[in-house]
Image: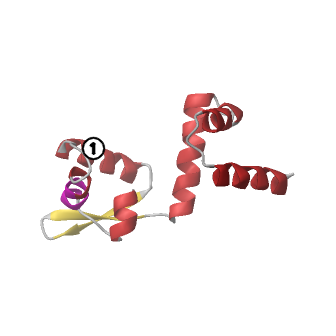
């Protein structure tokens, strides 16, 4: 999704080549994932010459919200607390990110 958002529209080959610059990945894996994202309604495809071009079907924020909810539901049985605890204890949050998280929690109260 990040590659398609960045490019605006992309073929499977475009996404594959972009990802390949960062890590080794199989073309068929990219194709399968893009088909899954299209089936879930995150991407929309249209025929362009001999290949399909994929475009985001929904705004980035809506897709991320949906994916995070799905992840929390699948991995944490719908409870957000274990995810937050993991993020805080994992040590990857910067002090600024922790302050932002505290601020957001206070705003939500």
Q: In this view, does 81 lie to the left or right of 64?
A: right
Which residue is label 1 attached to?
32
Residue furthest to the right in view is 109
Which residue corresponds to the image point at 14% horizontal and 70% vertical from the top-left? Answer: 49
Residue 62 falls in which quadrant of the image?
A: bottom right
Q: Nearer the viewer, residue 30 or 20?
A: 20
Crowd band around label 1 with a 10 angstrom C-alpha radius: few (<14), some (14–19), many (20+): few
The verdict on residue 1 being magenta is no
Give, as a single range, the part of the protein colored magenta: 12-17
Q: What element carries label 1?
A: helix
Q: Position of residue 48 (x, y in %)?
A: 19, 70
Q: Nearer the viewer, residue 90 or 4?
A: 90
Q: Position of residue 80 (x, y in %)?
A: 68, 37
Q: Where is residue 38 in the image (x, y as percent from the top left)?
A: 37, 53
The verdict on residue 16 being magenta is yes
**Most prominent secondary structure in the magenta stretch?**
helix
Q: Position of residue 41 (x, y in %)?
A: 44, 55
Residue 11 falls in which quadrant of the image?
A: bottom left
Which residue corresponds to the image point at 35% horizontal and 63% vertical from the top-left? Answer: 4
Q: In this view, does 72 lie to the left or right of 36?
A: right
Which residue corresponds to the image point at 24% horizontal and 58% vertical from the top-left? Answer: 18
Residue furthest to the front in view is 95
Residue furthest to the left in view is 50
Q: How many labels does the image show?
A: 1
Which residue corresponds to the image point at 33% horizontal and 69% vertical from the top-left? Answer: 7
């Amino acid at each position: 999704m990040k590659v398609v958002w960045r490019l605006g529209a992309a073929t499977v080959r475009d996404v594959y080549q972009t990802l390949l610059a960062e890590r080794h990945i199989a073309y068929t894996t990219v194709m399968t994932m893009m088909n899954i994202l299209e089936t879930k309604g995150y991407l929309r495809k249209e025929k362009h010459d001999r290949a399909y071009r994929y475009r985001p079907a929904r705004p980035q924020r809506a897709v991320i919200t949906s994916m995070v909810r799905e992840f929390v539901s699948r991995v944490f049985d719908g409870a957000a607390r274990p995810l937050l605890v993991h993020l805080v204890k994992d040590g990857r949050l910067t002090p600024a990110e922790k302050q932002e998280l505290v601020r957001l929690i206070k705003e939500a109260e």
